[in-house]
Image (cartoon, grey):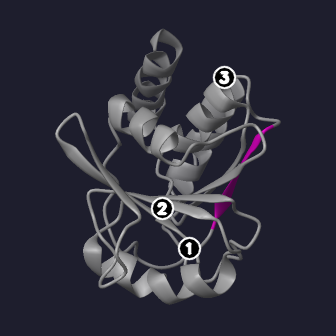
Amino acid sequence: MRATLSIAVLALAILAAGPAAQQRPARTPDIFFAGTRQTIVDGMLRLARVTADDVVYDLGSGDGRIVVVAAQKYRARGVGIELDSRLVSLSREVAAVSAVGDRVTFIEGDMFTTDISPATVVTLYLSESLNLDLEPKLRNELRKGTRIVSHQFRMGRWQPDETRTVDGAQLFLWVVP
């Protein structure tokens, strides 16, 4: 807990300092960045039953905390996909300082066009409408058995396989059929 809490503090410090490059994303992000609380990150990874054999993709990865914790705590490999170059730079710095840079990758790109087929776990903290827009991509690109965990938002009519409440937040798990 102490190590993961320090990641959040480090991320905020780096973000506040601001990287040298202040580039605008290739397109306007669909949603603003809101960091996921540590208890929720832990709950999402537990709900997905992440192991060292997993490749965890976080779509709209923000400061990278979900894939960094997956690598630290579960020895999983992780990939964050984020439009905002500033957040991608921050994520890479946090991963390096957290000594998981060899286990995680951050892609500055669009979650709708980036190949996610290597994922065994996908995490989301987006919105119900974005989840709905992503549903066809998730169903078509992901292999059978891939786990998808969403913080707070459902995915249209696709019923979750499991629902949990963690620290007052709803978490939803789908397993790709």
Tag 1 residue = 111
Magenta residue span: 103-108
The answer to whether one can see residue 174 in this image is yes
Q: Can you give x and y, in whole percent of width and height, for residue 50 in the image?
A: 62, 42
Element at label 3: helix
Q: Are discs 1 and 3 less than 8 Å apart at CB? A: no
> Going by the picture, which residue comes out furthest to the top?
2
Tag 3 residue = 97
Work out how far the residue at label 1 is from the one at label 2, CA to CA, in angstroms: 7 Å
- Foreground of the two, 6 or 48: 48
- Quadrant of the drawing holding the C terminus: bottom right
Q: Are discs 1 and 2 less than 8 Å apart at CB? A: yes
**Label 1 crowd (10 A; few <14 / some 14-19 / many >=20):** some
Residue 60 - label: 2
**Label 3 crowd (10 A; few <14 / some 14-19 / many >=20):** few
Q: Quadrant of residue 41?
A: top left
N-terminal label among 2 and 3: 2
Is residue 107 one of those drawn in magenta? Answer: yes
